[in-house]
Image: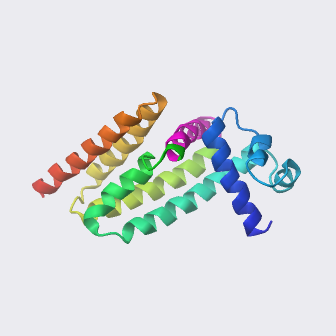
Amino acid sequence: MAEGSKQEIMEATYKALSKHGYADLSIQRIADECDKGKSLIYYHYEDKQDLMLSFIDYMQKGLEASHKEVMDLPEDQQLDRMLDITLGLEDDERWKFQSALLELRAQATHDPKFAEKFREMDELAYSKFEHVLNNIGIKDSEMVEVFVSSVDGSIGRKVAMGDREGLKKMKENLNNLVKSLESKN
């Protein structure tokens, strides 16, 4: 498939997931979000699962690109920007997507292919947070694990309840935690 077509299908998948969530996602709804017909999508992907596994790879590449952008910032701005990206606080579409992503992640409990994809994405996110936290003096791997788990848990709790304001407050709390850890180093 031409890279342009693949990119269009992945962007349409993002939009359709944001609008409809995973449970109500269909190939038709994805096709409705782009100029590609269902038949072209089915030509390249066996089914919804195959498309979603490719979409997780696409998200991981986007995550890598976002982290490169973060690393170009001054060290004192990196953590705040990374939290904005990870928590989905940038805009309404990103917030809606967090809910769909939560549904998609739930598939990992029943499907080893999804579990492996999310394991890879989690390892990437962990390594990026570890790098940013190490840059500001937090080098304790257990503390990094607690921090990353707090971020993940906050997303799960607040997105499931539709509590965007609570997630913003959690970001503030995480930043305060890091500041208190920095002062102890």
Q: Quadrant of residue 78?
A: bottom left
Looking at the figure, which quarter contains the N terminus?
bottom right
Q: Quadrant of residue 183?
A: bottom left
Is residue 113 visible from the viewing direction of this image? no
Q: Measured from the top left, where is residue 119 in percent x and y? A: 53, 50
Q: Measured from the top left, where is residue 171 in percent x and y? A: 31, 44
Identify the residue at image location x=75%, y=53%.
Answer: 34
Q: In this orientation, which residue lies closer to the viewer: 79 or 30?
A: 30
Q: Is residue 185 left or right of residue 86?
A: left
Is residue 55 visible from the viewing direction of this image? yes
Q: In the current view of this chain or complex, which residue is farthest to the bottom? A: 72
Q: Is residue 25 magenta?
A: no
In the rendered image, the vertical position of residue 135 relative to residue 106, given as above or below:
below
Q: Is residue 32 left or right of residue 65?
A: right
Q: Measured from the top left, where is residue 142 in percent x and y? A: 28, 50
Chain part drawn in magenta = 94-111
